[in-house]
Amino acid sequence: MAWYALKVRATQEKKVSDRIRNELARLGIEYQVKDILVPAERVLEERKGAKKKERERVFLPGYLFLEVTAEEYLPELIQTLKGVPDVLYFVSPARGAPPMPMADHEITPILSRARSISTTSESDQTFEVGQLVRISEGPFSGFEGYVAEVYPEKQRIQVRVKIFNRETPVELPYSHAEKI
């Protein structure tokens, strides 16, 4: 079994995946494709003035990955998938050349990222107690202070800022602070 990359219309990856499954089932050839992978991951999205919301984000827009059960099915699959809306082409080394299976070192990171259970955050920053930061958003925007506490499960920090020569604790999300 080998993985092949399929170029599809961006933002339509999930719909195209469903269309491919339906078309293969309609023709009775679903055994030719073991798996169809939409390269997506779960992320925590934070919007101004709103709570964090978990959503799925496609990290390789415009691509699907098909695990084909046997290479001899490939010519029939290519012809079948040409008729599926929003499918553009199989990725190949040269225009008009037959598609090549992906190497293990190419597909393994994509599979592990797409199938990981943990959620990642849109803000990949990490902070440490005592670190100097600048507040970038909110009422204390432009103030600098030291990180007093870190709450990684909430993606928030407590920063001590000096206001009128007095230290004041300010709790804010990671995305509202910048390391200095």
Image (cartoon, helix red, strand yellow):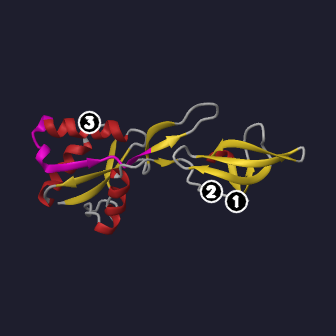
- The quadrant of the picture occupied by the C terminus is bottom right
Decide: marks 1, 3 in contact (CB < 8 A)? no
Coordinates of residue 23 in the picture (x, y in percent): 19, 37
| Amino acid at pointer 2 | Phe
Position of 32 with respect to 120 (left or right) is left
CA gap between label 2 and label 3 equals: 44 Å
Position of 168 with respect to 7 (left or right) is right
Label 1 SS: loop
Q: Residue at x 27, y 36 (%)?
A: 18
Q: Give, as a single range, the part of the protein colored magenta.
A: 26-42
Label 2 SS: loop
Coordinates of residue 88 in the picture (x, y in percent): 34, 46
Instruction: Bin the neighbour count of mark 2 within 10 Å (Cα to Cα): few under 14, some 14-19, many 20 and up.
Output: many
Badge number at residue 131: 1
Q: Quadrant of residue 30?
A: top left
Q: Which residue is mark 3?
A: 19
Q: Which residue is mark 2?
A: 127
